[in-house]
Image: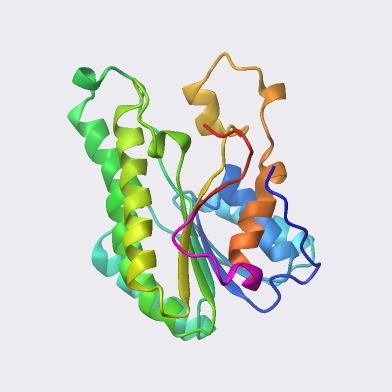
Amino acid sequence: MFDFKCEASELANKVILVTGAGDGIGKQAALTYASLGATVILLGKTTKKLEDVYDLIVEQNSPQPAIIPLDLKGATKQNYIDMVATIKSQFGRLDGALLNAAILGELSPFTQIHDQIWNDIMQVNVNAQYLLSQALLPLLQSTNSASLVFTTSGVGNKGKAYWGAYSISKFATEGMMQVIADEYDTTSVRTNAINPGATDTNMRSIAYPGENKQNLAAPTDIMPAYIYLMSDKSSHVNGQVINAQAASN
């Protein structure tokens, strides 16, 4: 596992947006960031799941979070612009954003990828990240030290048979991260990506239905990498892919 020892108030007074915050890694990241003092903005498509995470954050006596219900598959450029304007008006700034939301689609031979599945994956995993990043960057740049973090995968730097559209979308994610990181290299914004590796999530269960979950990391196990990239201790790190586990796929 990625080795980073954080302080109890590592993210105190930070405002952090987490997409895909209703479940899996996004949910755990939101809970973890909040437990370390951050005010977390929970973005996801299912309001009930976001409300459940909201309640858990309140129960752990962390700063009161905020909820933004938004389906990335249908969101428009104006939706993202309006969302960022709301964040600015309510919080005055944004110190970090974890772009974690993604869909798997289905695993199939390349020639059998359905057009609609391809389009949906590209919309959520690539187009939404592009539009959201465009909207977020000016607000992130207004702070002294801001972190933009994408979520990638082992199949995002080495193609894997039958992973088709998802794999290609993660190649695009890493490319987008690198372009933004290079453009903003001399600013207060650093941009990186995390490869969570084999982790016990619903998406992993769909991809590997017969896998023994006891061999997988839990979302809590991989949080050190997520904390590190949101912490000011990573202010010198830019344009990198961080593996949350030693062996990632």
Residue 25 magenta-drawn? no
Report the predominant secondary structure element of the magenta stretch.
Answer: loop
Rendered residue at 56%/34% (across/down): 248
Most foreground residue, 196 or 132: 196
Q: Is residue 151 left or right of residue 24?
A: left
Q: Quadrant of residue 133?
A: bottom left
User: Residue 244 location in percent, x, y?
Assistant: 61, 45
Q: Is residue 150 left or right of residue 173?
A: right
Rendered residue at 72%/71% (across/down): 37
Taking the image as drawn, is residue 146 in sight?
yes
Most foreground residue, 205 or 11: 11
Taking the image as drawn, is residue 73 in sight?
no
Residue 239 magenta-drawn? yes
User: Residue 126 location in percent, x, y?
Assistant: 30, 49
Most foreground residue, 209 or 43: 209
Magenta stretch in the rendered image: 232-240
Question: Which residue occupies the extreme top position in the image?
Answer: 210
